[in-house]
Each structure stands twice: as C-alpha cells, then as structure tokens.
Amino acid sequence: MDATISELYTIIERGVAGERALIATLEKIQERYRYLPPEALVLASAWLGVPLSQVYSVATFYNAFSLVPKGKHCMSVCMGTACHVRGSPRILDWLETQLGIETGGTTRDRLFTLETVNCLGACALGPIIVTDGEYAGQMTAQKTNRLLKNLKRMEVKHG
Amino acid sequence: MVELRASSIPEVIEEHLAESGSAELTTTYVTVCGGTGCRIYGSDDVFEAFKQEFSRLNLNGEVDFSIKSTGCHGFCEQGPLVVIRPQEIMYVHIRPKDVPEIITKTILEGEVIERLLYIDPHTGEAIAKESEASFYKHQKRVVLDLNGLIDPFEIDEYIRAGGYKSLETVLTKMSPEDVIDEIKCSGLRGRGGAGFPTGLKWELCRQQPEDIKYVICNADEGDPGAYMDRSIMEGNPHRVLEGMAIGAYAIGAQQGYVYIRNEYPLAVRHLRQAIDQAQERGFLGKNLLNSDFDLNVNIKLGSGAFVCGEETALMASIEGRIGEPRPRPPYPSQSGLWGHPTNINNVKTWASVPIIINRGADWYANIGTENSKGTMIFSLVGNICNTGLVEVPLGVSMRELIFDIGGGIPNGKRFKAAQVGGPSGGCIPAEHIDVKIDYESLTSLGAIMGSGGLVVADEDTCMVDFARYFMEFTQEESCGKCVPCRLGTKAMLATLEQICAGQGRPGDIEYLVELGQEIRKSSLCGLGQTAPNPVLSTLRYFRDEYEAHIFEGTCPARVCKGLITYSVIPENCTGCMVCLRNCPENAISGVKQEVHVIDVDKCNRCGTCMSLCKFNAISVS
C-alpha cells in the first residue's frame, strides 16, 4: 500500500457516529487509494467502533469498493440497456481480448483495469467507455482500438 | 402543527426578487445544454466559446443578452444543443467554431442560420423553433419545464421563475392537513414505479405520534437505460428540495436525506450547491422563511448497489449497513430510518409537489387518465431515432411516444418491442403499440410503469438474449438475503444462457415459467418479486423465438453466439486484410487483394470482423 498511517489519520475522523459514518469513511479511503487497503479497514474498525466483520461486509457488498489495487488507467464499459442493444457486449469482448484480461481484472503491468458499470445515463451516446473519468461515446471496435492505442502510446512517451 | 410567524414571510421572497433584478425572464439569452449527455459531446467548450466571444466583441452593455449553462434540454440525440430565447431558435450539434457566427448573425442581426437548425428526418424540413420540432411538439413539459431555461447553479434563477412560492404558500396559508388533502386531490401517485398514492402515504406518516420523523428522496436511479431523475437533479435541484420541504412540513419531519447514486457526479455537485444556497436563503435549515418549522437536508451517496433503490434497503444503507431489505410491515411510514416514521418518495414525485401546490390540485388532476393523473417522464433509449428525455401526459399512446416524439426506429428497421420498467418490467410488443400508457394498462400487458425507462428494441434484437441480459443484471444485483431471489435468479439465468448457447432442451420454457412464478411469489423484496418479469413477458409475446432457439437451433435475430456463423461474401470482399489483422482468434486467412476465408472452428463469433468491414463483405447466418 502506498498509504502512510499518518495519512489515514487525516482521512478517518476519529470519534464520529460509529456505523453511521462507515460508508462515508470507506468512500473517502477508496477515493484516496482507489482501493481499500487492509490496514485502512482495521483502522476504520477501531476508530469508528464498528466490528471488523461489519466493515468487511460493507466493503464487499457495494460495487464502489474494491479490496484489490487497481491499474493506472481504469476503463469502464457501460452495460446499460441502451448500450447493450447498441453493441456494448462486443466492445467489452474486444477490450478483454486486446488487454488479455477478464472484466474486473488488471493487466500484469498494472497499467489497465477493465470494469463494467450498470448505466451512466448518457444513453444517446452508447456504447460508452469511461477511461479515468473521461467519457467516450458511440464506440465501435475501431474507435476502441484507437482509444487503447493512444493510451498505450502516451504510456510509452510519458511513462 | 407548527406555529407560524407569518407576517414576515412574504417579504423574504420579495426581497430576493428585488435583489436579483427583474422578476421575469424576458431579455434575450442563450441557453447551452449542460446535461451529462451534451457535456460528453463537448457543450462545456461551446459555453466557454460563447463567454469568450462575448467579451472579445466587448458587447457588454451594448446588447442586452446573457449566456447560461442549463440542465438537460432532453433532446440528447442532437447535442450539444443551443437555444436562443425568448425567440426559441434551436441549433443542434454545435461546435465552438459555430459560436462567432451565432453571435454576429443570430443575436446581433436576428438572422437564423439554416445549416445549424434541426432537420426533421421525415419531412426534410429545417425547424427553427424549439417547440415546433416533433420531439417537443407532442410533449407536455410540467416537471421539466424549467430544465432548459434556468441555470441550476443559481438559486435566484429558480426564484425568479416562481420557485419557492409554493413553500411560502404552504407555510403561510396552509395547515399540514390542507397540504395532504391537496396532494390527495391531485391524484399524484409515486413516480418511483409502484404508483402508491402520495397523499395517502404522507397521511400515514403524519398520523404516527412520534416526534422524530424523516423524509427521504430516493435518487438511487439504478435501472439501466433510465436517467430521468438525474436530469431533474442536474437541471432543477431546487424544485426537488422545495417539494421535500413541503412534504416534511405536511408530515412533521425535521430531517431529510437525498440518497443519490455515486455514478452521477454532476447531479451530486448541483444538489450540494442547491442545498447550500437554500440554507443561506432560509428555504432550508432553522426557521424556514421565518416560521417555526425546521428542516435540514443531507446527501447520502449510494455506493453502487441496485437493491438500495428498494426503500428498506436504502434506509439500511443510510444507517451505514449493507443494503439488505427487510420484510414489511412495518412500513417505513410506521418504522423507518433508525426506527422512526419515514416517508420516502422518488425524485419525480417530490419535484411534482411544488407544481401541484402552485397550480392547484384540480389543474394537475385534469392531466392524465381516470386513475393515473399528471405527467410521466420517460427516457427514450435504445434503437430509436430521438434518444432523449420526454415528458408526456399519462394516457398518451405508445405509438405517439415512439414514433411522433421518438422519431421511430433508425436505419429503416422494424419496431419489435418496447421494454418498460427496466429489469423489473416487461415488454410491449408491436401488436400493442396503440396502448394508452398508464399504471393499469401497462400492468395488464405484463409490464410495469417503473420509474420511466423505456428501451426500444428493433428487429435485430434477440428477445431471448434481451431477457438473459436483464436476468444477468438482477442476478448480479441480488443481495442474497432470501433464497428464492438468490438461487432462483441463478437457476433462471443458467437456463437462459444454455438456450442462448444453443443447448436449450425441451421443457426449458415450462421450467422458466414455473420458476419465475415461484420467485415472484416468494421473494422478500421488489427486486426478487419483479426479477422474472422480463423473462415471463418475453415468453408471453415472443415464445416463438424461444422455440426457435430450443427446437430449431436458430437465433432468428442472429445475435446468440452459439447459434450463428460468420462468413465472407466473396463478391464484396476486396482483400483489404483489415478483418484478418484484427481477428482476436486469428480465424481469418487470406492474402492481400484476394477473398478472405473465416475458419468456423476457430471463430469465437465476436463480430469484430463484421463491425470493422467497410465493404459489407461479412455475413452472419
């Protein structure tokens, strides 16, 4: 984990309302580290006074939380109904083959994580891929190819 | 009932109006759609270009016009949208480079630029006025009326358009009972899907003797292909807050929560700003508008669990636990958040409240049908020409919605079915396209109103695969607490997957029906109780497609991978090597400028070759 304990101290507010603050706390940790480091869960449990088992159950229940570190670039394919009927499964298949990982996985070089999202509500632009918060709409295999190539080229250039 | 210090209240709004200038929206102004859809198309750059060009030409003081970034205009297919008001000149697909011309020609000289207008695809006619485009002409925008007019970031804009007047009326002139009666008379029913009468729900909560009560706005819009709630919160968050304040007053609640999806960053930002501004101005917080009534509203972010749209699961999530539903009764109105009486309504329901108070219950009850009053907002998506957000009076026909407003099916394809109500809903097939949409008619056809997601499927959509898609969704989102939902959806999904893979067996259809009916009856919450709907509904209308998969080994829509083969059409193939190079399985062989061949055994039917081929040389059978 690239977190220092002192940093966690600033994220987790001590002595706030127990289980009421649990989800918000985990959201903050997830936002900072892009996953939930085990140390953070233990600390959150101790400080909020919530059993570790409950922290774990909440952390594994919600899709927004991840217990494993993510890659440098996060690609998320929208699987909403509108995107589905416009061909998003094919885009996802294509990305899986190109990246050599299954959905939810991270490439070995830790550069890419491939995910799906239920619906982004921008259905006129389907199929949509979100890369690190940037939306790309009306995707085709060709456009996906270009997107991936650009990302890889940038990585080679800037590291 | 709370004691009111009524004398000082009317002045509060008067003061706001005096401070913020004119009470009318009359001068020329440009509205750039700033909804999530248009932003993805680049509307932020268009807005910036307007601001820059405006200051570059140094028009300040010379001409009387302003620029606004507004909420979603609804016509997402044509974004970025720019409308010049009050003339209502609508320009579509605007790029920053178009901006100087719009300012010099349209705004300064009043000339309409033809090439930027929307062209009606059926008549070929260029439409200059927003309200004359067929997409808008057939709508009745009541809840969405201000969406394209006001800047959602500025509370003054909402106040100038008459906002918070209803709250003022309620606090000065109405008792909580009066408010409940008014909502009851309006016939408003819950817009989250179930359609429970709102006034009655409020009354049940009001009647509880406890002191501490809560109101919750359910903005956990989880149905895939639906974005009505998001657009309201992005475009007019104050109206939702005003509705909540009126409801809280009627019920006697002091604390409100908006439970909103984390996947809607823009809506969250607008809502946060709106709460801060409303608090600053005394529309929320202590002593609302100088009365003795207090209401605080907080935002709770959903963490990506579909089941949290269910009210008891939603409350568990606010309390900081996993979002598992619990059996009802007790209903939230009796024992809700932390055991206190709680009233939960959907975004659209809350947003309808100030309108009903302002225009009167009779006015509202005049819109719609006998049992379904008012308007309904749908997001029209899928295989449809005009993807977008539409508001129509209840009782409008499906045909009007899909063909008049939605513009029909793109690429000359045939309409097959409309899926209403998302993963909990069902489909309306072509033979029922003239059905008048209301709560009861949709239920009788095996669909539900749901929260307003309407996905159109054309002839190329395989209904078995469509049902499999929804079952995969609900199975994935099942929280696992009750057995019928946890295991039942898994069993149904496995059967559907086998059918789609070409391994369906005789008896599968009967098995799906039996299992589906059991899951409906025995699941704990709405998620499980409605999960089989898409399957049962497609079985009702498209049984022949299931039979073709199982008994003939074919997928009539040529979608299911296990039942199709790709091949090269020799007369169209130019031998360009594009498919060959991009085939992930290396299943295509050939040399440059000679016809390629697909090895059926190696092919994984991903369809990449077909989507990449520029010469229509790949066929699927």
Image: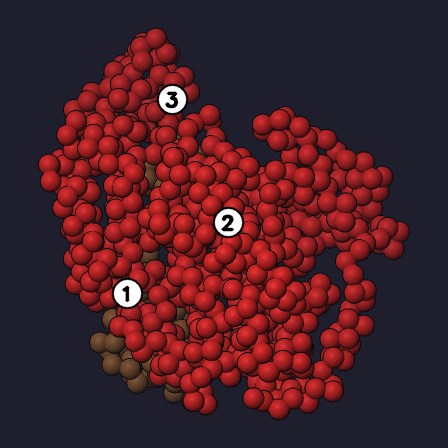
Chain colours: A brown, B red
Farthest right residue? Answer: B62
Residue under label 3, please give it: B613
Q: Nearer the viewer, mark 1 or mark 2?
A: 2
Mark 2 surroundings within 10 Å by alpha-carbon count, few (fewer than 14), some (14 through 19), many (20 or more)? many
Identify the secondary structure beneath mark 2.
Answer: loop
Task: Tell me the residue at 61%/38% (across/down).
Answer: B134
Could you say which disc has been placed on residue B525 in the image? 1
Q: Position of residue A147 (x, y in %)?
A: 43, 39
Q: Is residue B465 visible?
A: no
Contact? badges 1 and 2 (CB < 8 Å): no
Mark 3 surroundings within 10 Å by alpha-carbon count, few (fewer than 14), some (14 through 19), many (20 or more)? some
- Residue B111 vs residue A25: left or right? right
- Looking at the rendered structure, whether the residues under marks 1 and 2 are on a common chain is answered as yes
Vertical side of B250 occupied by B590: above or below: above
Kind of residue indicated by mark 3: Cys
Task: Tell me the residue at 23%/57% (across/down).
Answer: B520
Contact? badges 3 and 2 (CB < 8 Å): no
Q: CA distance from mark 3 to mark 2?
A: 45 Å
Q: Chain of mark 3?
A: B
Asked where in the image residue B337 lies, by quadrant, the reply is bottom left
Q: Chain of mark 1?
A: B
Residue under label 2, please give it: B395
Asked where in the image residue B212 lies, by quadrant, the reply is bottom left
Q: Position of residue B392 (x, y in %)?
A: 55, 49
Q: CA distance from mark 1 to mark 2?
A: 29 Å
Between discs 1 and 2, the one toward the N terminus? 2
B56 and B456: which is toward the camera: B456
Mark 1 surroundings within 10 Å by alpha-carbon count, few (fewer than 14), some (14 through 19), many (20 or more)? many
Kind of residue indicated by mark 1: Cys
Q: Position of residue B395 (x, y in %)?
A: 50, 49
